[in-house]
Amino acid sequence: MPELPEVETVRRILMPQLVQKTITAVCVRNSQIIAHPDAVKFKELLQGQTITTMSRRGKFLTIHFASEGKLRLHLRMTGQLLVLSAAEPIQKHTHLILYLSDGNQLRYIDVRRFGRFWYFKNEETDEISGQSRLGPEPTDNSLTAEYLKLKLGNKRKAIKEALLDQTIVAGIGNIYADEILFAAGIYPGTRCSALKDSNWFRLAEKIPEIILWGINANEMTTEEYLAGKGRDYRNISGLRAYGHTGKPCGVCGRIMEKVTIGGRTSCYCLNCQRLPME
DNA sequence: CTAGCTTCCTGATAGC
DNA sequence: TGCTATCAGGAAGCTA
């Protein structure tokens, strides 16, 4: 459920607490979350590494080290990364603890255990995490109406599904997909092949706009993050479509409806989001 | 290549 | 009150 804006928030909150810290010890409490290499090697490789920076690509986070390799992770549905003092009791569903040189701990907590960690040495290429298959970032210059039309213009699938496809655009999940389609005035079930040039243009405009809005809307202090604000991903104020089923549309007042597309619930306003007309 | 289904998981909530 | 069924969903893997 954390999507690009929430993952970016995690990065912004955690990076200052991690930079220049050395990992003194590693505790893998559930090896299921370690995707590469195996848990034993993972632990050995991380030990003694000094963190230089933290980057984000789509919904992936990467912790970079001074001497060797990088740690990549994906929070999937319910993953949480927290820097806590050693005195904090270990909470349920804590699967990984990195002990830091300042006495704090970077903990990974994930109720559903869908999240994954990968460690790659400098000479290793990452073809397994999925990051290499990502499409452009929403704010990248290459994300244009022409690009979207070229990639999707002849596809039969619904535009809502296409927005969730990380190989088309990186970082969009169910919440922001609904918001983007609302802002662009497009019904989520519209087949890509039915979209007009004006629709592609609106999408290319609204994708970065909504994602940047989301990053801004998520802005919070470290205290707020630890207090849980950064962990209730649906609790962003200002959403106009997601979770609004049965409520009046903020633009026209019509009661908003939901439809299931590709197994996911999509909320929309039938008045503001139309199928393209000839 | 694509559409559609399943898997992974637990907790919140709805219905009886 | 307590039980069971359903839903939530990111991404990969599978089948037809």
Image: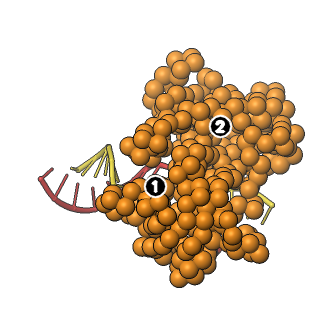
Chain colours: A orange, B yellow, C red
Q: Residue visible at 43% across and 59% down? A: A104
Marks 1 and 2: CB-CB under 8 Å? Answer: no
Q: Relative to A166, is A6 above or below?
A: above
Q: Nearer the viewer, residue A172 or A53?
A: A53
Q: Nearer the viewer, residue A61 or A273?
A: A61
Q: x and y percent of residue A134 in the render?
A: 74, 56
Q: Relative to A97, is A52 above or below?
A: above
Q: Residue visible at 56% across and 41% down? A: A175
Q: x and y percent of residue B13 in the render?
A: 32, 44
Q: Residue visible at 62% across and 31% down? A: A213
**Residue A152's mark?**
none
**Residue A211's mark?**
2
Look at the numbered disc 1 and give the secondary structure of its residue. Answer: strand
Nearer the camera: disc 1 or disc 2: 1
CA distance separating discs 1 and 2: 26 Å
Look at the numbered disc 2 and give the secondary structure of its residue. Answer: helix
Q: Relative to A67, is A263 above or below?
A: above
**Residue A83's mark?**
1
Q: Earlier in the sequence, mark 1 or mark 2?
A: 1
Give the amino acid at mark 2.
Ile
Q: Residue visible at 59% across and 58% down? A: A20
Left or right: A202, with A100 as reference point: right
The answer to whether residue A92 of the structure is visible from this angle is no
The chain carrying label 2 is A
Same chain, marks 1 and 2?
yes
Q: x and y percent of residue A9 in the render?
A: 56, 44
Mark 1 packing: few (<14 Cα in 10 Å), some, or many (20+)?
Answer: many
